[in-house]
């Protein structure tokens, strides 16, 4: 039977919204569950995940995650042809390559903070992709840098009013997540039980959505 590779892409209009954070966590959980997954870092200017992967490798952390820097999604897909899952960490700012990435992907995830300054540009990115022919069902938000439950609810409602969906769960604004990643861990590997549970909830909802995309 021919292997069918699923591509999940993380895109954003601006840096610092949690794109690489979620890509790392999805990769970690996918590999832990037995999937043959690869991360394609397309942010050639910053190479954030490549740098994180070096730290993880130097510390000998398990599971081992395959990470590689690519110029575009076509090159990444060719290199990952024998994998079950290709996780694409897109450039830090939306551009023409964002449409190219979205067209190749079964699911496009855009992290966003709760402020309108974050949400409005992000919503415009998704509206732009819809105009380029990307089905809305492939586009989903993930909430990050959340202060309170009410803030998450308000952001989720705002996204839904714009015609899009946000994944169940969210990541609160906590230094422990940054500390974990500085040490080569994913957010699902933080040592703080409550924060790990919140990260697990969000990433599991993402995994569920990936499964729907694979079967749909």
Image: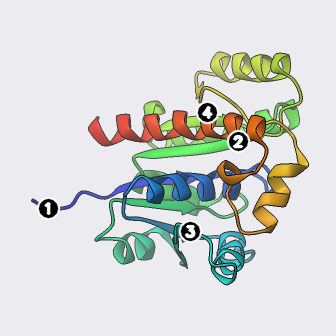
Residue 127 showing in the rendered view: no
- Image x and y of residue 143, in percent: 72, 34
Residue drawn at x 52%, y 45% is 108
Residue drawn at x 44%, y 34% is 208
- The quarter holding residue 154 reads top right
Residue drawn at x 45%, y 35% is 209
Indicate which disc residue 201 carries.
4
Q: Secondary structure at mark 4?
A: helix
- Image x and y of residue 105, in percent: 42, 52
- Position of the N terminus, as image quadrant, is bottom left
- Position of the C terminus, as image quadrant, is top left
- Name the residue that disc number 1 marks: 2
The alpha-carbon separation of the residues under discs 2 and 3 comes to: 17 Å
- Name the residue that disc number 3 marks: 62
- Image x and y of residue 204, in percent: 53, 37
Indicate which disc residue 144 carries.
none
Residue 17 showing in the rendered view: yes
Query: Is disc 2 in contact with disc 3, using a CB cutoff of under 8 Å?
Result: no
Indicate which disc residue 196 carries.
2
Q: Secondary structure at mark 3?
A: loop
> Which comes sooner in the sequence, label 1 or label 4?
1
């Amino acid at each position: 039977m021919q292997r069918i590779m699923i591509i999940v892409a993380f895109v954003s209009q601006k840096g610092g919204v949690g794109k690489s954070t979620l890509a790392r966590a999805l990769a970690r959980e996918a590999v832990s569950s037995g999937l043959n997954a690869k991360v394609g870092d397309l942010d050639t200017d910053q190479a954030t995940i490549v740098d994180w992967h070096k730290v993880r490798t130097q510390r000998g952390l398990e599971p081992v995650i395959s990470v590689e820097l690519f110029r575009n999604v076509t090159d990444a897909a060719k290199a990952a042809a024998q994998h079950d899952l290709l996780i694409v960490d897109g450039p830090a700012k939306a551009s023409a390559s964002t449409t190219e990435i979205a067209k190749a992907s079964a699911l496009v995830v855009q992290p966003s903070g709760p402020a309108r300054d974050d949400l409005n540009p992000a919503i415009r990115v998704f509206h732009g992709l819809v105009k380029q022919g990307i089905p809305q069902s492939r586009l989903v938000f993930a909430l990050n840098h959340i202060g309170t439950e009410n803030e998450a609810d308000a952001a989720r409602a705002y996204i839904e009013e714009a015609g899009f969906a946000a994944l169940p769960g969210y990541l609160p604004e906590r230094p422990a997540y940054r500390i974990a990643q500085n040490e080569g861990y994913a957010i699902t590997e933080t040592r703080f039980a409550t924060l790990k549970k919140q990260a697990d909830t969000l990433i599991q909802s993402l995994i569920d959505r990936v499964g729907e995309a694979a079967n749909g």
